[in-house]
Amino acid sequence: MDFRNERTWQNAVETNRTEEFHAAYEAAVDKVRADFGQKHPMIIGGQEVWSKTMFPDTSPADTKLVLGLFPKGGRPHAKQAVNAAKGAFPQWSATASADRVRLVQRAADRISQGKFALAALMSFENGKNRYEAMADVDEAADLMRWYAAEMLRNQGYERPMGTFVPGETTRSILKPYGVWAVVAPFNFPLAIAAGMSTGALITGNTVVFKPASDTPFMGLRLAETLRDAGLPAGAFNFVTGPGATVGQELLDNPDVDGFVFTGSRAVGMKALQTFTRTRPKPIITEMGGKNPAIVTASADLDKAAIGVMRAAFGYGGQKCSACSRVLVDKGVKDAFVAKLLSETEKIKVGDPTARDVYLGPVINEAAVATFENAIAEIKRSKGTVIAGGKTLKGNGHFVEPTIVDGLPRDHRINKEELFVPILSIVPVDDLEDAIQVANDVDYGLTAGIFSREPAEIRRFLAEVQAGVLYANRTAGATTGAVVGVQPFGGWKMSGTSGKSAGGHYYLPQFLREQGQSEYT
């Protein structure tokens, strides 16, 4: 099976069909809007399940707009889902790997067929503009197809082994663990959720899936997609509710055999400690980043300014790969900053479904508070806000893309992930100094460099401690990993496994090896 990326927007540009893209997206906006305000269930063991209490799923662009009402599940619902997944495991794990592959491929095809409706709904639910929403949907289908191709390429992870004595037949086979909890973030509510879930399912595990409470609608769409593709009842269970109850039960329940999570460092570290406290169990976490872009004295400053702006302010900095600090050679700092300011001034903030809007809202009130508190702290620390810095009035959670200068290298703003559109400029003496600053944080997810010197790029690639490195990438200095092109995963406090999504080594994490020998 040949793998090919979906590339919806890129294909439209390359074939001069962008107006068709816009027309299809805008028609989908009108269509999905007509269905807002309804109640939606959890799906456990193939059945609709409700709770006594519902919570509203509102749009961050207009908090008065209720997209839907979802059950506020609790520990009993999570337990019910774990039991359903445990019950479904024997049949699903015994299903031939080729049959699991075909089901996942059908699910990917369903995502491709409904891509515009999914992208439109995502714009309403988490505030991504149409281009980023479509890229998220494309990535979900890409991850499904990539993992399907990996299962085929590795022949279901079953290999013959050597012979030590006559009449001996041996093999190594990777087998599923059992029930996996999948806890997904709001920022890639389809792509990351689909990728983690597919990793567990296609290898023969069953799943209890908890979406972020800010994006339950996209989680429901994933559950429906897998169900309609033919996944057996109980193999994938969709539970909504708070992390303090639903999420905690998934960590505490002894029948959960594996845990995969994307989110904050604090939650990820707590999950790591809690989940493995009584016995060894696999846990895969991706926990964010403090990603630097290095601009050297030899850099093409026009490309650097575009690449840094896109990486810093794409989706409002709400990506674990977002560029939150740019390390600029002192000799070119003024010229670079002038170009960066010029690019940032072009950003239009507003309704993410509008064609010309680049930056929609941040996800919720807590994100706005994080932004406002950071700006106040920057000013108290005598840092200078040279662009943005304001919260915008209205019914949505809108803030300005912000650039700050003058903070010490060891300031909290230069060390901790904020997940809001704030970019800090840090002057450096040379490449050696830049690499030292780049590595002097707890995280190690992504990093970028702009340089026209091959020796500088080689040194950057050799010495920077991060899981994903880019050189001279104008599409995004630190962002935009593509399935099958750039494996995506973090080092240090950015992740626990050292194996990357969309790469060759991801699926074996959901499996355990068994050696089998037969004698005649």
Image (cartoon, helix red, strand yellow):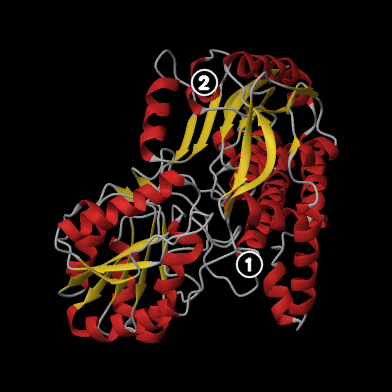
Q: Is residue 77 left or right of residue 317?
A: right
Q: Is residue 40 above or below residue 27?
A: above
| Residue 300 in sight | no
* Horizontal and vertical percent position of residue 170: 65, 27
- The amino acid beneath tag 1 is Tyr
Asked if residue 87 shows in the view, the reply is: yes
- Badge 1 density bin: few <14, some 14–19, many ≥20, Cα 10 Å: many
Q: Above or below — where is 223 with respect to 16?
A: above
User: Looking at the figure, which quarter contains the N terminus?
Assistant: bottom right
Quadrant occupied by the C terminus: top right
Q: Which x, y percent locates residue 131?
A: 63, 67
Q: Disc 2 and disc 1: Cα gap in Å?
A: 35 Å
Q: Give residue 79's quadrant in the image.
A: top right
For label 2, the crowd category at 10 Å Cα-Cα, with few meaning under 14, some 14 to 19 and many 20 or more, is some
Q: Is 317 in front, or is 351?
A: 351
Q: Earlier in the sequence, mark 2 or mark 1?
A: 1
Residue 457 relative to residue 36: left or right: left
Disc 2 marks a residue whose amino acid type is: Thr
Helix, strand or loop for disc 2: helix
Marks 2 and 1 in Cβ contact (< 8 Å): no
Residue tagged 1: 131
- Judged left or right of residue 387, residue 344 is right
**Residue 105 sits above or below residue 519 on the image:** below
Question: What residue lies at 61% left-to-right and 75% top-to-bottom?
Answer: 356
Spot occupied by residue 420 in the image (x, y as percentages of width and height): 40, 55
Mark 1, secondary structure of its residue: helix
Residue 347: image x %, image y %? 48, 75
Q: Residue at x 60, y 27 (%)?
A: 180
- Look at 33% across and 80% down and name the residue there: 451
Q: Which mark is residue 152?
A: none
* Mark number displayed over residue 245: 2
Camera-side residue: 116 or 354? 354
